[in-house]
Amino acid sequence: MLTFLGKRILQLIPTLFFVSVIIFSLQQILPGDPATIMAGEERDPAVIAQIRHQYRLDRPIPIQYVYWVKGVLTGDLGESMRIKQPVRSLILEKLPVTLQLGLMAIVIAVTVGVSAGIVSAVKKGTVWDYAANVFALWGLSTPNFWLGIMLIFLFSVELGWLPASGYVPLTEDWRQSLASTIMPAFVLGNAIAAVLMRHTRSAMLQALGSDYVRTARAKGLFERAVVLKHAMRNALTPVITLGALELGTLLSGAVLTEQIFTIPGFGKLIVDAVFNRDYAVVQGVVLVTATMYITLNLLADIAYVLVNPRLRS
């Protein structure tokens, strides 16, 4: 296990290097000049030249990349050109919001989607199977913005149970924090639950038709033990992969949902940075997002080994 972890961690180093090169390179092809935008309407050449020198925009691109990487390795992601704040502080301010929202959404998605997929596979051809498939079709077909608006209308306007928008940190009031994020988390988890349901159902049907499941039934094991201990553990491998990727997508920022519910997360931060040509913020947010994706893939590989004993050798 330790050897496996060591190899996977070593593989992350060149991956992160190439990711950093791609992030910095793509940043250079964005249209517009950040120095001109920061200079304002007057666009005094002296001011523009001073801004270029301050943010090293007058240096060759390879030199700019070296300075950026050296800063990243020391925890310095630069300074926002627009609001004059360190990028690291902006990320640390927005990341907990997106983490909370993403984790709540993935818990809802896994709980509902995996459970529905198992029931649908075990009860194939019954009313439970049809109901689970209708749920999956509804989840995949429902636009997030429409579902979000309907939830606000029902639970905030009509019933008055939940706040329509805004965000309260967990450290201030955990009840209010959960109340302000449960609707956007449900909106995000709804579509993911539908996808997880379809994949879980497919993997479970394949597992239930395998030889080792027939052998387990022939030995007289209870059906619950056959389903949960033998079939489900082997069927979870593709579901773990999908869950890790979907969680990475959520942590990168759900722009539309955050806009509907006025959630100040990663989505709003990256959109504002792109529109304002705030290079440092864009680079920092994308780098953190890519690192989270890579980390989640590593955790998924570890989960494979824990779930499937055959992979431990």
Image (spheres, rainbow, N blue to C red):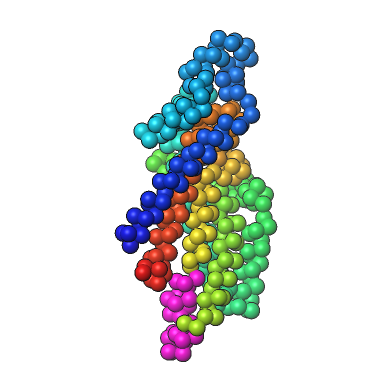
Rendered position, 167 above or below 49:
below
Task: Say above or below: 113 vs 68.
Answer: below
Of residues 279 and 164, the one drawn nearer to the viewer in this rendering: 279
**Residue 235 located left or right of residue 29:** left
Q: Please report the residue visible at 60 percent of the width from the left and 56 percent of the height from the top.
A: 191
Instruction: Using the rendered view, name the quadrant where residue 302 is placed.
Output: bottom left
Give how far across and how far down residue 228 sits, in percent. 45, 75
Q: Quadrant of the N terminus?
A: bottom left
| Location of the C terminus (image quadrant) | bottom left
The image quadrant of residue 26 is: top right
Q: Residue 130 in magenta? A: no
Viewer-nearest residue: 166 or 121: 121
Q: Nearer the viewer, residue 143 or 77?
A: 77
Q: Is residue 233 magenta?
A: yes
Query: Can residue 306 be seen by looking at this rendering?
Result: yes
The reply to whether residue 102 is in sight is no
Residue name at image x 50 percent, y 47 percent: 251
Magenta region: which residues? Answer: 213-235
Q: Which one is in front, 233 or 9?
A: 9
Residue 8, above or below 273: below
- Residue 280, image x and y in percent? 50, 30
Residue 226, given in percent of the width and then of the height, sits at: 46, 80
Q: Main secondary structure of the magenta part?
A: helix
Decide: is 309 above or below 155: below
When asked about the image quadrant of residue 67, the answer is top left
Q: Residue at x 62, y 11 (%)?
A: 42
Residue positioned 36% across, 60% down in the render = 4
